[in-house]
Amino acid sequence: MKKKFFSAVFATALLFAGVAFTACDDDDDDNGAPGTNPTIKFENVTTMKNYVQSGTFTGANPGGKSTFTFHAAKGERLMLATMYSYSNDLFFAPENPGIQLFDDAGVPRTGVIDNALKLWDNGTRVNEQPGPSVNHPGTAEAGVVTEVNGQDKAGHSYVPATQLIQVSLEFDAKQSLFTCTLTNISTDTANATPFSNGVFVVSNVLDGNLVMDKPFFAVDQKSGTELTALAEAGNVTPLNTLVTSQTGIITTLHGAIVVIYTGDTNPIYQLGQKDAQLGLAALAQRGDPSPLKTSLEKVPQVRKIYVINDTVVPGKDMSCSYEAAANEKIAFATMFGYSNDWFFANGSELNALTKGDVTSKTLLLDDGTAVSQYPGAGNAQFIFGGTLMPDDQPISVVGNTFPVPAVNELIKVTIY
């Protein structure tokens, strides 16, 4: 499923703000003698990851339940897999790319999710009559992953997966947190079976597209060894190890402001103080630097202001040349795009004519004006078209509530 809501949201917001998609724009106000013209570059060095979250869940006997939680936002999908235990190599999983968690309006799906899972044949073992007496591992075969719809290729019969395992969802809007319950409802069917421990992932989204739209398998293709271990023996370790290595927080950089100033006070923010309501929230929440630019144009100590209206995906960069003199300082800020109100900014004073890599002087900050959710999996986040929940906290350094990579693993800031 391919959607383009990221691009649409960004474009709409920037057009509404009345700014253009230019590489760099200054305030056209020359308040001092010309100096030199350095360039500041913001590089998104985020390592791409397929999944924003992943994990394991416990199996359940007929009549039992298994529960796990995960964060997710509009456009993201839930994929999971668990073995049909009374089989040689059958497993339950959604159809690719996974269970849709929100409708097109961003409303979470809750309650029992109809037709959430299907029954699949891994194609690596000859199917025996399903039941507790199945031989494990059984006879090997070199098949492909196929759906079991009523009968397997050996002619054994199965009731629909929806009569064997049920998926239900609950949603906590503040945390953007789903609770998924898998109920084994196979008790009174001809195919009563336990289901094994399993693995789940929530796919990352970039530019409106799922980063991985076939997480565990592809129909009519050979299964990987990791899924095979789960389908044949209920062994979650290989698949969980694989997806864990592919799981992590990613982000865009969205919008930037560069300020040349004099004096001892950073005009963009003050750590430990509340947002001064000069427009920083617009940058931190939705990547729009124009309100802050308008406010700072009235500050006597501010000599030049430059804005960059761009969205920078991992592996790309944005830059801006500026005019500065030896006695002036530089301050900058750019949005951590996959957040509610986070931004990168220099934490210590920087001479405007500084040269080199200044990433070590860059902080990831929480503006304190919106409730924080799991980065890249918060349905209230602007990047997902959400409505922020207001907060009123001092500006602070982002802590370890979420597994956010170190600043230098997300952004590189260079002046040259």
Image (tube, helix red, strand yellow):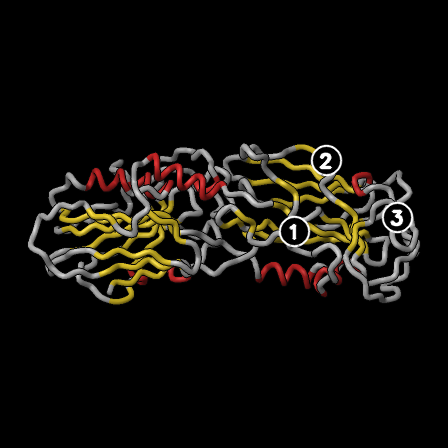
Q: Nearer the viewer, residue 411 or 150?
A: 150
Residue 386 appears in view = yes
Circle 1 sits on which residue?
A: 200
Question: Measuring 70% from the left and 56% from the top, which residue is drawn there?
Answer: 218
Front tag of 2 and 1: 2
Measure how far apart labels 1 and 3 are at the Cα level: 26 Å
- Left or right for 227, reference 210: right
Q: Are marks 1 and 3 in contact (CB under 8 Å)?
A: no
- Reading the image, the residue beneath label 3 is 151
Of badges 1 and 3, the one in the foreground is 3
The residue tagged 2 is 114
Among all residues in the image, which is located at the extreme left? 33
Q: Secondary structure at mark 2?
A: loop
Regarding mark 3 in the picture, which secondary structure is present there? loop
Residue 53 spot, x, y in % from top left: 57, 51
How far apart are the two marked residues, 3 and 2, measured between alpha carbons? 21 Å
Q: Quadrant of the N terminus?
A: top right
Q: Amino acid at mark 3?
A: Gln
**Mark 3 or mark 2, whichever is nearer to me:** 3
Which residue lies at the image location 16% right of the left edge and 49% below the top edge?
A: 304
The first of marks 3 and 2 along the sequence is: 2
| Rendered location of residue 62, percent (x, y) | 83, 43
Left/right of residue 212 with respect to residue 259 in the rendered view: right
The quadrant in which the C terminus is found is bottom left
Disc 3 to disc 2: CB gap under 8 Å: no
Question: How far, Cα to Cα, is label 2 from label 1?
Answer: 18 Å
Q: Earlier in the sequence, mark 2 or mark 1?
A: 2
Q: Amino acid at mark 2?
A: Asp
Q: Earlier in the sequence, mark 1 or mark 3?
A: 3
Number of callouts in the render?
3
Q: Is residue 285 above or below residue 59?
A: above
